[in-house]
Amino acid sequence: MRVMALDVGDKTIGIAISDALLLTAQPRPTIRRKDVKTDLEALRRLTEENEVHEIVVGQPLHMSGHQSPQSEKVARFAEQIHKVLDIPVVFWDERLTSFAAEQHLEEMGLNWRKRREQVDKIAAMIILQNYLDSRPGRPA
């Protein structure tokens, strides 16, 4: 069983999936959003192929911690994920994950175009790794 994390945007969904031991997060190809039905079907395939039992959705909050218009859109989409896939959905604070992903990719020496292609899945990987690291009983 694995955990999948999503960095949901208006145009793309960044994806990361844990290993079977729930220790590490690996980025997966980003989904280009088309419509809700197509997006949910792509997520269904991924959950089935990878035996995902829980989905962590990055919650885009303002720096103050308050909800943003985007966090409300993401919450509605997460509700649909839960209904259609019948998998528990957990929200995780994603403040600064895209910034951290950008910095990581810049340190790797990628130009801005390559960084733009990779940032969503790296943000999802950071969200998932933070979530996995926070779980009780996690080995040190």
Image: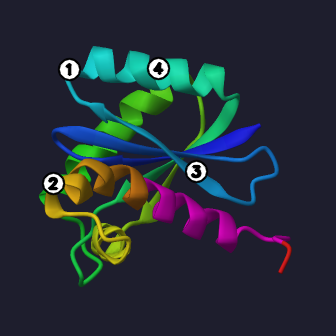
Q: Which marked residue is nearer to the observer: mark 4 or mark 2?
A: 2
Q: Range of the magenta residues?
A: 124-138
Question: How many angstroms separate mark 1 from mark 3 (CA)?
Answer: 25 Å
Q: Residue at x 20, y 20 (%)?
A: 35
The amino acid marked with disc number 4 is: Val
- The answer to which of marks 1 and 3 sits earlier in the sequence is 3
Secondary structure category for the residue under label 2: helix
Q: Is the Cβ of the residue at disc 4 closer than 8 Å to that at disc 3?
A: no
Q: Residue at x 23, y 54 (%)?
A: 114
Disc 4: which residue? 84
- The answer to which of marks 4 and 3 sits earlier in the sequence is 3
- The answer to which of marks 1 and 4 sits earlier in the sequence is 1
Disc 3: which residue? 26
The amino acid marked with disc number 2 is: Arg
- The answer to which of marks 2 and 1 sits earlier in the sequence is 1
Q: Which marked residue is nearer to the observer: mark 2 or mark 1?
A: 2
Residue 129 shown in magenta: yes
- The answer to which of marks 4 and 2 sits earlier in the sequence is 4
Q: Is residue 55 above or below residue 122?
A: above
Depth check, front residue: 123 or 90: 123
Q: Is residue 122 above or below residue 93?
A: above
Q: Quadrant of residue 70?
A: bottom left
Percent x, y of residue 75: 32, 46
Question: How many angstroms separate mark 4 from mark 2 (CA)?
Answer: 34 Å
Q: Which marked residue is nearer to the observer: mark 2 or mark 3?
A: 2
Number of the label disc, if any, that sits on residue 113: 2
Q: Is the Cβ of the residue at disc 4 closer than 8 Å to that at disc 2?
A: no
